[in-house]
Image (cartoon, rainbow, N blue to C red):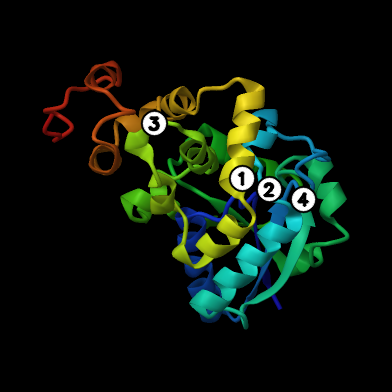
Amino acid sequence: MMHYIYTSRFQPFNIKELAELKWLMEESRSNQAKIVMGIINPDPTRHQGKSDPSGFWQRHNPLSYWQRYQTIVTIINHIGCSDEVVGIVPVPGRPSQKHNMQLCENVFPPRAARKMCVPCVFMHEEENKRIKGLEKQGEEVLPIPTHAFAPRERIVFQELVTCLMASEDSRLHDKWKCFVPEAIFGILEHARVINTVKRHFLFDKRDPYHEIKEKWSPTEILRDTALHEEVRRLFAGHFIEESQYHESGGTAATLGISL
C-alpha cells in the first residue's frame, strides 16, 4: 500500500491546504493509496528541526500540536476523507532537509511505501530545491499542482492569516476568515488564537501590515494577473500598489489589470 505524506505547519489550517488535501483525496482514491498528514513543528515553543527560522517564530505558530490535530480531524470529517487519511503524525521540520527526515523515520511509513507530497505554487527555485532535497535522499516525490488551483487558494501563505489576525487596521477586520475553512472557526475562537497572535506580535514589535507587503513582493505574485485581481478584490489594493506593478517588469495594462 502506497502512502502520500502531506506535511505542513497548519498554523492554522488554511484554504490552500484544504484544496491540496481534496486533491490528494481524489488522487489516493484513483491509485488505491492512503494519506498520512504530518504536523511540522509540533511544539511551537521548542523548534526541534532545522528549517527557515522565520516560519517558526511564535507569532506565526499560535496553535499547539493538539489544537492543530483537532482542526485536521475536523476537516477530515467535514470533507469526508476519513477512509483515505490513516495517520496524523508529528514532524520536527521540513522533510526535504536530511536532518529532519532522519528524525521522521519512526513516524513515517517505510520508504518503499511512501511518496512525499510537495505543493508547487509558483514552480520556482525554492520548490524545486525541496523536491531535489527529497530525491537526493532517495524519496519518491508527488508534486501537488497548487499552481492550477483557484487564485484565492494560491495566494494564501501561513503567515498571511496570522498577520491579518494581528492587524489593528479596521479595513482588515475578520479578513483572515477569507483564508480559513469555516469548519474550524469554532476551534480557533475557543483557543483564543487571535489574542495569542496579537500578544506575540506586540512582544516581537513587528507590524503585521508591513510583513504582508514584504511577503507579497516576489515577482511570482506580482506578475500573476489572477492573483493580482484576487488581492485587489479582497483588499482594495492595500498591499500591492501601482508602483509595484511597474517594478515587477510590466505595466497594469500588459497585466490586464484596471487600476
Residue under label 2:
135
**Percent x, y for residue 113?**
74, 69
Q: Quadrant of the C terminus?
A: top left
Query: Which residue, given by chain and number where applicable, does mark 4 sit on?
Result: 42
Q: CA gap, disc 2 to disc 3? A: 44 Å
Q: Is residue 152 left or right of residue 205?
A: left
Q: Is residue 68 above or below residue 166?
A: below
Residue in the picture at 49% in, 26% down = 211
Which residue is depicted at the point 83% across and 62% down? 107
Distance from Cα at disc 4 to Cα at disc 1: 23 Å
Task: Give the label, 2 or 3, closer to the camera.
Answer: 3
Crowd around label 1: few <14 · some 14–19 · many ≥20 (10 Å): many
Tell me the number on the disc at residue 169.
3
Q: Which residue is mark 1?
A: 131
The location of residue 70, given as percent across then percent down, is 67, 66
Quarter of the image for residue 159 reads top right
**Most foreground residue, 67 or 149:** 67
Q: CA distance from mark 4 to mark 2?
A: 24 Å
Question: Is residue 55 something one can see in this rendering?
Answer: no
Circle 2/circle 1 CB separation < 8 Å: yes
SS at mark 3? Answer: loop
C-alpha span from label 3 to label 4? 31 Å
Mark nearer the viewer, 3 or 1: 3
In this orientation, which residue lies closer to the viewer: 19 or 191? Answer: 191
Question: Which of labels 4 and 1 is toward the front?
Answer: 4
- Dot in front, 3 or 4: 3
Q: What whole-number distance in Å separates the C-alpha atoms at marks 3 and 1?
A: 38 Å
